Image (tube, rainbow, N blue to C red):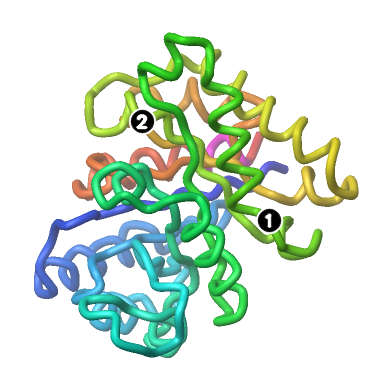
Amino acid sequence: MRRFFIAGNWKMNKSPAESERFAAELKKRLLDINAVDIAVSPTALSLGVVTQKLKHTNIDVSAQNMHDQSTGAFTGEVSGEMLREAGVTYVILGHSERRHKFQENDSFIQKKVEASFRCGLLPILCVGETLEQRQSGQAASVTLSQVEKGLAGLSADQVAAVTIAYEPVWAIGTGHTATPQQAQEMHAIIRSWLKDRYPDFVHKQLRIQYGGSVKPHNALSLLEQPDIDGALIGGASLKIDSFVAIIETAAQLSKG
């Protein structure tokens, strides 16, 4: 039985009060779904109320980012230790918006990935190419370079615990989605790369999500691809009905 991992990235949306109400509704709507791993990623300001609301449920909480240092003069930043104490399970690292809008490079992202394990957090490592890179035939090389640099220095056991989210930059928040065939091709390339470099259990255990304008109407065609293990969802995770519909689709597929 396949076990999908569906995560919602709320980005800079929902106040603490809105987040608490949304989490309460999710808790009710998803109470009976146990065949899918689920996480939501509110803003840092809303992590406290959401983790409290979702405590002892089947829904985990993820942070959207973290610093690689435990403490220090880093105004506006949050450490992994702080996130873990707040009840966070996952942390999204290397999202294209962090790479392109905030100029985070592969070296900094790699340090964060290492730090996440030190803090007891599970990283969701985001990778993916721009439209220009895809059109110039560099999609695979760019994506694999981000994977390789992001996983550098980790043990095989740690790599197996990473979730990789393949998010083609040209499909994030644009309404354009990679076709199921395009997404599957890149997921297969990533899994093959892992198979060539790590013990067999790594490519079998590590989950590769697809992210980029995932909606209820295209979730089935994406999730039924053999190398797509879930989805990292942006806009559709902000609406209760659409997020629940995608999770229900994953649950049905998990049952075979």
**251 over 30 or under it: above or below:** above
Kindly identify which numbered label has been placed on residue 169: 2
Kindly identify which numbered label has been placed on residue 220: none
Q: Residue furthest right?
A: 199
Work out whether residue 82 or residue 234 is closer to the camera in this orientation and state it: 82
Residue 243, given in percent of the width and then of the height, sits at: 31, 45
Q: Where the N terminus falls, by quadrant?
A: top right
User: Residue at the location (59% across, 23% down)?
Assistant: 140
Q: Where the C terminus falls, by quadrant?
A: top right
**192 over 154 or under it: above or below:** above
Quarter of the image holding residue 47?
Answer: bottom left
Q: Residues within 10 Å of mark 2 (few under 14, many from 20)?
A: many
In-image side of 65 versus 60 (left or right): left
Q: Secondary structure at mark 2?
A: helix
User: Residue at the location (68% across, 26% down)?
Assistant: 188
**84 over 91 or under it: above or below:** below
Under mark 2, the amino acid is Val
Quarter of the image holding residue 234?
Answer: top left
**Cα–Cα span, label 1 and label 2:** 22 Å
Q: Which residue is mark 1?
A: 152
In-image side of 63 versus 188 (left or right): left
Q: Which residues are magenta?
A: 250-254
Specify the principal SS of the magenta part.
Answer: helix
Q: Is 251 in the magenta?
A: yes
**129 over 126 or under it: above or below:** above
Residue 46, given in percent of the width and then of the height, sits at: 21, 74
In-image side of 199 versus 55 (left or right): right
Q: Is 156 in the magenta?
A: no
Q: Secondary structure at mark 1?
A: loop
Work out whether residue 223 or residue 203 is closer to the camera in this orientation and state it: 203
In-image side of 131 versus 10 (left or right): right
User: Residue at the location (54% across, 52% down)?
Assistant: 36
